[in-house]
Image (cartoon, helix red, strand yellow):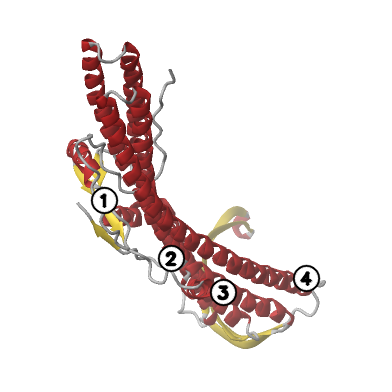
Amino acid sequence: MRALSLTLSLCVLPVAAGAQTASQPAAPQAPRAPATPVTPPAVQQSLSASAASEGRVITLAEAETAARQNQPTLRSAQANTDAAHARVDQAFSGFLPQVSASANYTLGTSNREVIQVVGGGSTGVVSNTTRRFSGTLSANQLVYDFGKTTGRYAASRESAGAQENSQQQVLQDALRDVRAAYFNVLTQKALLGVARETLQSEEARLNQVNASVQVGSRPEIDLLQQRTAKANAQVALIRAQNAYATAKAQLNQTMGVETATDYTVQDVTVAAIAGEDEVLDALVKRALESRPDVAARERQILAQESQVKVTRAGHLPTLSLSGNATDVGENPFNDPTLSVQGGINLSWALFQGGLVNAQTREANANLRDLQAQKDALRQQVRLQVEQARLNVVATREALTAADEAQVNARERLRLAEGRYRAGVGNIIEVSDAQVAFTNAAAQQVQATYDLATSRAELARALGTVDLSTVASR
């Protein structure tokens, strides 16, 4: 006698209906809609009871909103964007006058010995107190520096724009992660329903076999076989419960929240991505025009090109205006000691030991590096789009095959149970049919939510933020 084990694969998609009795013919399958199907009614009743014990229901939109508000990676990206804009303001300050002021006030006492000769002579000490104030107000205004300040400002603006694009990419990645985690919760939730349905079926069959053994119409080995099948179903249920709880913990992490997992998620239907059946080149072109990481790399190159010009301009002089006002005396601004000066300054570093040439070579090398990264990113985008598109096509076909396999497995189980009741079949045949049906149901579940996840990944590869979904029951 061989022990039967219940295997629940990590597949995703609506679960198949529970096992039917011999008197119940297999129900005909309705045509499948283009959108991702939802969990079948056979498992919905079991899942509804579980959902009632879990309390609140989280929708996909709520999960995405939580990620936008709480995900640390998004807060970090926003902080980096704010810092980049602050650097733009720093670069712009070079166009404005630079004004500084300094003041100094000193108070001192000096003692000196005085000898008086008249009247026999005497010695005394004379103390003098001095007060002195000095103040200076200086200003400097850049007139022309051959594009150095302008180039730094342009580079900082492009860098800030690149950081904004990078922030959008971080958002898209965060949404992709929370969607994948959400669909995984739906997967494990549906697989939990399959495990519960299987255990219920095995328990009911155990009662039937036990009754048959009691009256002597079946050997005792059938009872042992069925008890093993029920135990395996219990193990599978425990594993499914753990996988479901783990999936919700992972969803919490992608949402950036630290709360209990006493919730369930609302099932959704994911519609087809616009253009998912287009030719590859058209999808790649669309991705290159829409993806923020591609735009970020373009702006990084523009920023580095400006930086190259700034570095090369280090050979050229800087022209500026300067002026200062100084007042010195015991009574500030009352003594006629105020002096005012102004002038035109030209500074030119004639020789710096090859520093500017070396800096220019470095800036050009960094520019070539960014251009190479841009080409690598284009290739990566093409690969990601092609993989996502192929996954969508494959999961759609797999879902169709999984539907057929589930229908056939259900009919096989119905026939095996009928043969066993008629006395022409054995318990191993029934157990094998039950395992096949359970695996087929799990496979259908996996295929359903695999398609949802593949479409979410394709949306991310194309640079699309929104995902068209329809809430089901």
Marks 3 and 2: in contact by CB < 8 Å?
A: no
Q: At 30% from the left edge and 59% from the top edge, which residue is drawn? A: 32
- Can residue 79 be seen from the camera position used here? no
Q: What residue type is labelled 2?
A: Gln
Q: Is mark 4 on a helix, strand or loop?
A: helix
Q: Is mark 2 on a helix, strand or loop?
A: helix
Marks 1 and 2: in contact by CB < 8 Å?
A: no
Report the side of 66 relative to 372 (left or right).
left
Report the side of 83 relative to 448 (left or right).
right
- Can residue 70 be seen from the camera position used here? yes
Label 2 crowd bin: few (<14), some (14–19), many (20+), radius 10 Å? many
Which of discs 3 and 4 lies nearer the camera? The answer is 3
The mark found on residue 168 in the picture is 2
Count of labels in the image: 4
Report the side of 373 relative to 206 (left or right).
right
Residue 373 in percent (x, y) is at 63, 66
Q: Which amino acid does label 4 sit on?
A: Ala
The mark found on residue 298 in the picture is 3
Disc 1 marks which residue?
267
Disc 4 marks which residue?
358
Q: Which amino acid does label 1 sit on?
A: Asp
Q: Earlier in the sequence, mark 1 or mark 3?
A: 1
Residue 55 in percent (x, y) is at 18, 40
Marks 3 and 1: in contact by CB < 8 Å?
A: no
Residue 264 in percent (x, y) is at 25, 43
Which of discs 2 and 1 lies nearer the camera? The answer is 1
Q: Earlier in the sequence, mark 3 or mark 4?
A: 3
Q: Earlier in the sequence, mark 2 or mark 1?
A: 2
Query: How far apart are the two marked residues, 2 and 1, measured between alpha carbons?
Result: 27 Å
